[in-house]
Image (cartoon, helix red, strand yellow):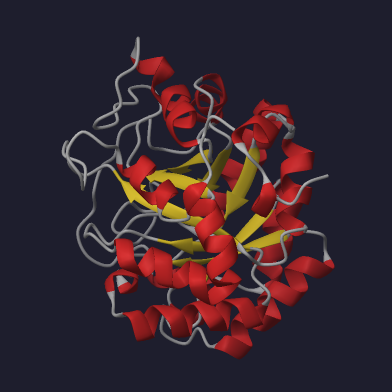
Amino acid sequence: MKRLLDCFASDLKKMDKKEILESIRASEGRIICAETTLVSDRPILEDVSDAELKSCLGADMILYNWLDVFHPSIPSVVAENAENAIREVKKLTGRLIGVNLEPVDEGAKTMGEIHKISQGRQASARSAKQAVKIGLDYILLTGNPGTGVTNKEIINSLKSIKEACGDEIILMAGKMHAAGSPEDAGEKIISKELIKQFAEAGADVICIPAPGTVPGISEQFVREMISYAHSIGALTMTAIGTSQEGAGKETICKIALMCKMCGADIHHIGDANVDNTDNLIFYGYTVRGVRHTLKSMAKSPNR
């Protein structure tokens, strides 16, 4: 089996969920997942989707935030109909494409203003089945600020989605930040017990904040969480979801190297709603060197 690091679009089309997960594991911490948030109807570059841009900058996986799976509209992506939008993105990029779905806890206490989100952005068996239908490769159960997402509800959503979808789609779970929940703030955002519960509920990949991104989340702490996740068979993804993805080169490279030393299988980098294209390249250089980064940037989706 090829490492995801070496896969072309034609390879991905032949792989099932189990093979994709093994190809990520075999890549030894050199896979980059770039997030793109659909907060605007204008992409960073005119007439080119943000997914295409981030793929050409070395992203192996694209993660959509704020995507409504029942009404998937993506700027600068022209498809026959809305349901074909994701398949068109996959055709244009040759990458694995995923979505954030948010397990909203209606009774949750939150810090700050509450934001209501559409059913197509919320985590449920129905939205997950729709994600499979429109061609998404993976789902990350996580939370944006002020949406009322809790770790408790992430576990409940994992169970219902796993029951509804089985092995049709890769499931990831975990918060990048507290998302407005005082109960999940700081080091309470993740624990070995939560990792165990996520995995038992159906998570294939555990999402953990990158060292230095959330108060109290140190390199040692993340290393312990990743080691435990690996010991029970789960893959891991460190995440920069605190707008530090828009920080300078030195900060990005330091976080990237810490994530690599902690043992991350996948490196997530957000978009901070700004043009942080250079940081995506710097991150790639740090965790996999120039050769593999340039290869990822250069490979055609037609291969």
Q: Residue at x 74, y 62 (%)?
A: 196
Foreground: 14 or 285?
285
Left/right placement of residue 188 relative to residue 181 reads: right
Q: Residue at x 70, y 54 (%)?
A: 24
Q: How many marks?
A: 0
Left/right placement of residue 107 relative to residue 284 reads: left
Q: Quadrant of the N terminus?
A: top right
Residue 219 coordinates in the image, percent (x, y): 57, 87
Q: Evaluate whether residue 241 shows in this view.
A: no
Name, please, the residue furthest toward the top. Answer: 80
Foreground: 284 or 98?
284
Q: Residue at x 30, y 33 (%)?
A: 118
Q: Quadrant of the C terminus?
A: top right
Q: Evaluate whether residue 229 shows in this view.
A: yes
Q: Reply above or below: 288 against 297.
A: below
Left/right placement of residue 109 relative to residue 289 reads: left
Residue 213 coordinates in the image, percent (x, y): 41, 78
Q: Residue at x 28, y 64 (%)?
A: 276
Q: Reply above or below: 71 against 166.
A: above
Residue 221 coordinates in the image, percent (x, y): 61, 85
Residue 158 coordinates in the image, percent (x, y): 62, 44
